[in-house]
Amino acid sequence: MVTDAATEPEPAFKRILLKLSGEALMGSLDYGTDPERLQAVATQVKKVRDRGVEVAIVVGAGNIYRGMTGAAAGMDRATADYMGMLATVLNALPLQDAIEKLGEHVRVVSAINIAEVAEPYLRRRAMRHLEKGRVVIFAAGTGNPFFTTDTAAALRATEMHCDALLMAKNGVEGVYSGDPRTDPDAEFLPQITHMEAVQRGLKVMDATALTLCMENRLPIHVFNMDDEANIDRIVCGERVGTLVAS
């Protein structure tokens, strides 16, 4: 069967960065990584790559370990954050494996040196991987304590000259005026500016990351990861979730 290429929508972006929280990989589990969710994400990444879009990914580790939780329990904050960075590698490796099994070439790039399992982060090398059509998974955050993986996503998206940052949320459709889990009157916001998000303290990402996106005029698409097909819809130019843009 021959598919009419004209019926396929043109991608709206040439290069994207997908931010996956640890919770987004957890699925319905209470802890750890859900193999079915991992496979679904890999399938969507493959679909986007088949459209010719270059894909970078930043992974979090909330499904395994949170540095803030360790710090709250009395651990030194820097030590706790380094443990969180290592936990992101534990998410990056199975994601790499799942995407590679679909025939894509993938590189895990770590901000801390783990030479046996990941390449060290070198900006020009990572750019070259993307240009060659490889999926690049950025692990270990920024490599520095006191910075979240949201900040790592904003930083890497800016460094890689991505056209958009896709923020996958677990169980919410986008950005709300309050927490929809606790506030029944929370209003869904289909589009806001970076400045509005900063001034209103909306839960898009942490303030450092949001400010970095604002300064570099990087649009953020915040969407529900419960439907993995949302990734492809956004890439094809559909309005899904909340758009945060200048």
Image: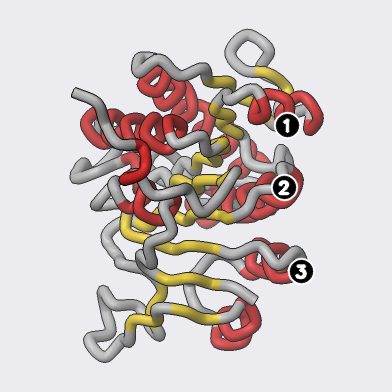
| Alpha carbons under labels 3 and 2: distance apart | 14 Å
> Which element carries disc 2, helix, strand or loop?
loop
Do the residues bearing badges 1 and 2 touch, measured as CB atoms within 8 Å? yes
Instruction: Give percent across and percent down for residue 73.
Output: 50, 52
Instruction: Give percent across and percent down for residue 55.
Output: 54, 37
Sequence-wise, which precedes: disc 1 or disc 2?
Answer: 1
* Residue position for label 1: 127
The three-letter amino acid code for the residue at tag 3 is: Glu
| Alpha carbons under labels 1 and 3: distance apart | 21 Å
Between 21 and 17, the one nearer to me in the picture: 17
Instruction: Give percent across and percent down for residue 24.
Output: 35, 47
Camera-side mark, 1 or 3: 1
Question: From what the image shows, is residue 38 above or below residue 16?
Answer: above
Q: How many marks?
A: 3
* Residue position for label 2: 161
* Residue position for label 3: 215
Sequence-wise, which precedes: disc 1 or disc 3?
Answer: 1
> Which element carries disc 1, helix, strand or loop?
helix
